[in-house]
Amino acid sequence: MGDKEVRELLRQIPGVDRVLEFEAVRGALARHPRGIVLDAVREELGEMRKRILLGAGPLPAFEADELGQSVARRADRLAAYTLRPVINATGIVIHTNLGRSLLPEEALTRLETICRGFNNLEYDLQKGQRGSRYVHAEGILRELTGSEAALVVNNNAGAVFLALNTLAAGREVVVSRGQLVEIGGSFRIPDVMSASGAILKEVGTTNRTHLKDYVSGINDRTAMLMKVHTSNYRIVGFTSEVAMEELAALGRQHGLPVVEDLGSGCLIDLAPFGLSGETTVGGALRSGADLVTFSGDKLLGGPQAGIMVGRKDLIEKCRKNPITRALRVDKMTLAALESTLRLYRDERQALEKIPTLRMIAISVEELGRRAAELAALLDTADRERVLHIEVRSGFSQVGGGSLPARDLPTSVVAVRSGQFSANRIEEFLRGFDPPVIGRIESGHFIMDVRTLITGQEEIIAEAFERMIEKK
């Protein structure tokens, strides 16, 4: 394309004021603030100029209807929320990228009740004076774990940081080399320890650490013995680690607090569901840990929070640390956490009403039935018979850095098509409203029904129907 043709095409690009008069753009102005629509117009016209100058195809269309519709769609995208609901068909129950644990209905109701009006977040109703926000979940945490005291901060990384900074700043913390974990977002125990002011003292080897290693690591600079849950990996084979009972006895012998970072924070025994070996918070305390930290939004099934339970004197020191204010939680976290924790007073109720536990505990038979229902809905939506739909056995994961290498038997619906590649199916469903997130395996788009919420099967069927219509 010559310079003359380029100049002619550039002259044909309408001005911003003219585009604002297009019918579709006037509709966008009725839906969105003028500034957003102006941005959409300028971006659309800018892309048209860029394509012309680069000689890239296809050449832009200048028809008012088509350009107006394109601007309106862009304005809708610019005005849309960035945090959106999605359908999790991955089979990963605690999916870090998809918001981790779902809150129980009781927590959602409590959130609305607390947030609709004023509340006693930091007001002591008995004394008629300022109180502390930290009392609101402490009682139920002590009740459920058997701890002397409890403290809630913003997340488990914050809880670990606070414990280290309060109890070990400038002194050494003895940790097994095999427990120097890195989790999502490059969160590393050595880095957190360094930032807290504590000094890491590695003992043992990657796969084997013995009590004598901890003994040799203790000196007059030692402030703490620490045990870290290997939340996202397992070391198997020729391995050895020191039990909490032994580590706690060593700590008492030397007058050192023993802290365990449990990560996920399991409150009930998951062995009946094929997930044995996970230490519960109460079990860690009964084994002798002086302080236990864990998350509120993983296996516990509540909101994001960092919880520490254990000895009252240690908790009180952490509470008084000025850093606690930087890590404190708000009324929404406390409301959702307390209401979730109350469900644990009845284990059967917790398994039924806490979505994370319910998804873990669901039977293989129920999963098979749900997969068959989804497959039938997809078959009905496939009027043109372009899909091959199959129910298969598969495996789900707990996720969220919880219970690594522990697979949960499940049923999945696998879809392939001669007209749509697996990548095209994945892309279309990811762009649907609401987005449907699955996975691709061996040329099939896979949907695991374990993580679907009742009623989402119909939405998935609608998404496939729309995809087929637009082929």
Image (tube, grey):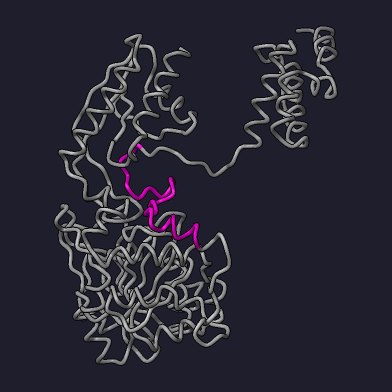
Number of disc labels = 0
Q: Determine the residue positioned at 71% across, 17% down.
A: 67
- State the residue in front, 338 or 395: 338
Residue 157, percent across and down? 44, 66
User: Which quadrant of the figure has residue 314?
Assistant: bottom left
Q: Quadrant of the N terminus?
A: top right
Q: Determine the residue positioned at 52% across, 76% down.
A: 324
Residue 268, percent across and down? 23, 64
Looking at the image, is 33 positioned above or below residue 131?
Answer: above
Looking at the image, is 354 positioned above or below residue 328?
Answer: above
The answer to whether residue 53 is magenta is: no
Looking at the image, is 58 positioned above or below residue 464?
Answer: above
Q: Determine the residue positioned at 47% across, 41% down.
A: 85
Residue 116, percent across and down? 56, 59
Which residue range is magenta in the image?
89-113
Question: In the rendered view, does 280 fall on the left or right side of 257?
Answer: left
- State the residue in front, 415 or 157: 415
Question: In the rendered view, does 208 fall on the left or right side of 125?
Answer: left
User: Which quadrant of the figure has residue 77?
Assistant: top right
Q: Determine the residue positioned at 48% across, 79% down.
A: 165
Looking at the image, is 121 positioned above or below residue 232?
Answer: below
Residue 451, percent across and down? 32, 42
- State the residue in front, 366 or 256: 366
Q: Quadrant of the C terminus?
A: top left
